[in-house]
Amino acid sequence: MVRVEAVFLDNGYLTDIRTAAAGAVAARHLAPANVETAGVIGTGVQARLQMQAAHLVRPFKHLLVYGRDPAKAAVCAGDLADSLGIEVDVASGAADLVARSQLVVTTTPSREPVILADWLHPALHVTAMGSDQTGKNEIDPIALAVSDLYVADRLSQCEVSGELEAALAAGLTPKETAELGDVISGKHPGRTSDAGITIADLTGTGAQDTAIASHVLAAMGAAGTVIST
């Protein structure tokens, strides 16, 4: 029998942290070994957390920020410059950001692509974080078909609420697919060349929420089943 031992009234903070951690794990296993410039599309809390986490595993020297609202993009860039201690600039557009970056993270609620397939280039990894509900779409479906590797946190989930949903609806399938867990465990090689193009589609899983909540509970000196709200 499962008993609830704790309820964390964290207002989503733990989910924000585990989402950023998942992005960093994807970057660690899928981004090119050397990332000089990274880019983030989006200017909210997750944009900040994603790049702070990614910098831990790929210590890029330059960061680009792009958002629809230039004022919010400037504030986000300033916050990240302060927290990371590196040069952070506001990109003139999403295409410019992708062209200059080796690691790109999208953190928007968009229902239309914010990255087009024509913008992809060798030695690029893209992590899409925003498509966590049916109908959301940040990456051009063609991009999944032309990339060297598409990695989902959970393929069955991404088919109905991730970038894969839009690709399948358009009659497109990735060249090669894998789940992030298989890449981490070594069951799938992940990125095999620094020149490759990889895409990670992270919709978030309940197992991640359970893991971070259990970690916090253990750090508090307790044990058991937890619920984070």
Image (tube, rainbow, N blue to C red):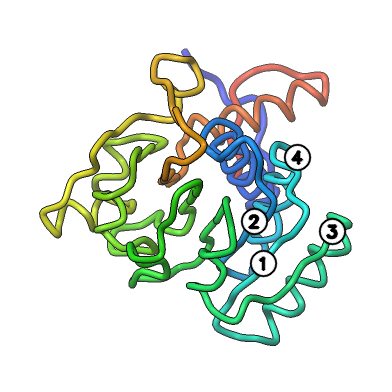
Work out how far the residue at label 4 is from the one at label 2, CA to CA, in angstroms: 13 Å
Tag 1 near tag 2, CB within 8 Å:
yes
Classify residue 155 as left or right of residue 229.
left
Residue ID for mark 1: 64
Q: Nearer the viewer, mark 3 or mark 4?
A: 3
Please tell me which residue is depicted at 66% across the width and 40% down the height of the picture. 34
Classify mark 1: residues with Cα within 10 Å, few (<14), some (14-19) or many (20+).
many
Q: Residues within 10 Å of mark 4 (few under 14, many from 20)?
A: few
Q: Name the amino acid type tagged 2.
A: Ala
Amino acid type, callout 3: Ile
Q: Earlier in the sequence, mark 2 or mark 3?
A: 2
Residue farthest toward the left in the current orientation of the protein: 171
Indicate which disc, 1 or 2, sits on the residue closer to the N terminus.
2
Judge from the rendering whether residue 52 lies leftward or rightward of residue 186; answer left or right.
right
Of 76 and 95, nearer the camera is 95
Q: Which mark is residue 38?
A: 2
Question: Compared with residue 35, is residue 178 higher up or lower down, i.e. above or below?
Answer: above
Q: How far apart in space, not on screen, are marks 3 and 4 (Cα)?
A: 13 Å
Mark 1–mark 3 Cα distance, whole angstroms, equals 11 Å
Residue under label 3, please give it. Answer: 86
Q: CA distance from mark 1 to mark 4?
A: 17 Å
**Circle 3 Cα neighbour tier, 10 Å, few/some/many (<14 / 14–19 / ≥20):** some
Q: Tag 1's secondary structure?
A: strand
Q: In the rendered view, would you say 117 is above or below 124?
A: below
User: Are the two marked residues, 1 and 4, in contact with CB atoms closer than 8 angstroms?
Assistant: no
Q: Secondary structure at mark 4?
A: helix
